[in-house]
């Protein structure tokens, strides 16, 4: 990871209408207009089947380890401290399941502005 950026996993809907993942860099100091922020907890052992993100939002994992998957078989693991940009608000969606014995505690930061198209950096 380059200096001055923080890594992020981005879930997005591609031109093919399917959910995909990419690793992107968010520049430190980048400002995003925020619509709302909320904390949530889901019990250990939980899972959520196929769905799309309800809105473009950063999801910061505080506790719990999860495995995410797209319908095309792309997978990734989220651990405490990881940042997800859930932007696949249309298309085939994704699913997740907790893979450790901890609850999933996280903060959702709903973005007020649209997320830019797939790119190496989100400013």
Image (tube, helix red, strand yellow):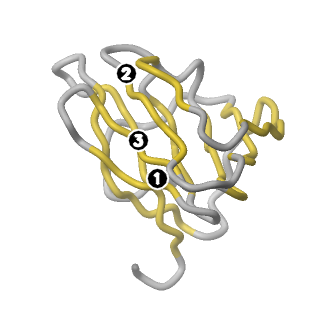
Residue 32, horizontal then vertical, whole percent: 67, 46
> Does the CB distance between marks 2 and 1 fall below 8 Å?
no
- What is the total number of numbered labels drawn onto the structure image? 3
Q: Count neighbours of disc 2 (C-alpha within 10 A) and say few if under 14, some if 14 to 19, many if 20 or more.
A: many
Which residue occupies the foreground of this view, 35 or 49? 49
Residue 17, horizontal then vertical, whole percent: 23, 16
Question: Residue beneath label 2, please?
Answer: 93
Q: Count neighbours of disc 3 (C-alpha within 10 A) and say few if under 14, some if 14 to 19, many if 20 or more.
A: many
- Look at 83% across and 40% down and name the residue there: 39
Residue 34, horizontal then vertical, whole percent: 75, 37
Q: In which quarter of the image is the N terminus?
A: bottom left
Relative vertical location of residue 101 with respect to residue 50 in this rendering, above or below: below
Label 3: element kind: strand
Left or right of 25: which side holds 102?
Answer: right
Q: Of marks 2 and 1, which one's residue comes earlier in the chain?
A: 2
Q: Count neighbours of disc 1 (C-alpha within 10 A) and say few if under 14, some if 14 to 19, many if 20 or more.
A: some
Question: Residue beneath label 3, please?
Answer: 68
Work out how far the residue at label 3 is from the one at label 1, CA to CA, in angstroms: 21 Å
Which labelled disc corresponds to residue 1? none
Left or right of 42: which side holds 88?
Answer: left
Give the number of the mark in front: 3 or 2.
3
Q: Of marks 3 and 1, which one's residue comes earlier in the chain?
A: 3
- Look at 60% across and 40% down and name the residue there: 45
Label 2: element kind: loop
Left or right of 54: which side holds 49?
Answer: left
Q: In which quarter of the image is residue 21?
A: top left
Question: Residue beneath label 1, please?
Answer: 122
- Look at 38% across and 58% down and name the residue there: 24
Left or right of 66: which side holds 81?
Answer: right
Which residue occupies the foreground of this view, 7 or 116? 7
């Amino acid at each position: 990871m380059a200096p001055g950026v923080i890594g992020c996993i981005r879930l997005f809907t591609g031109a093919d209408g399917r959910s995909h993942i990419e690793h992107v860099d968010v520049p430190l100091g980048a400002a995003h207009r925020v619509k709302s922020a909320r904390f949530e907890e889901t019990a250990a052992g939980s899972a959520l089947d196929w769905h799309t993100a309800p809105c473009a939002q950063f999801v910061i994992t505080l506790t719990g380890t999860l495995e995410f998957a797209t319908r095309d078989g792309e997978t990734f693991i989220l651990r405490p401290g990881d940042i997800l940009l859930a932007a696949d608000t249309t298309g085939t969606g994704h699913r997740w399941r907790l893979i450790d014995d901890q609850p999933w505690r996280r903060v959702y930061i709903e973005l007020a502005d649209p997320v830019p198209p797939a790119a190496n950096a989100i400013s």
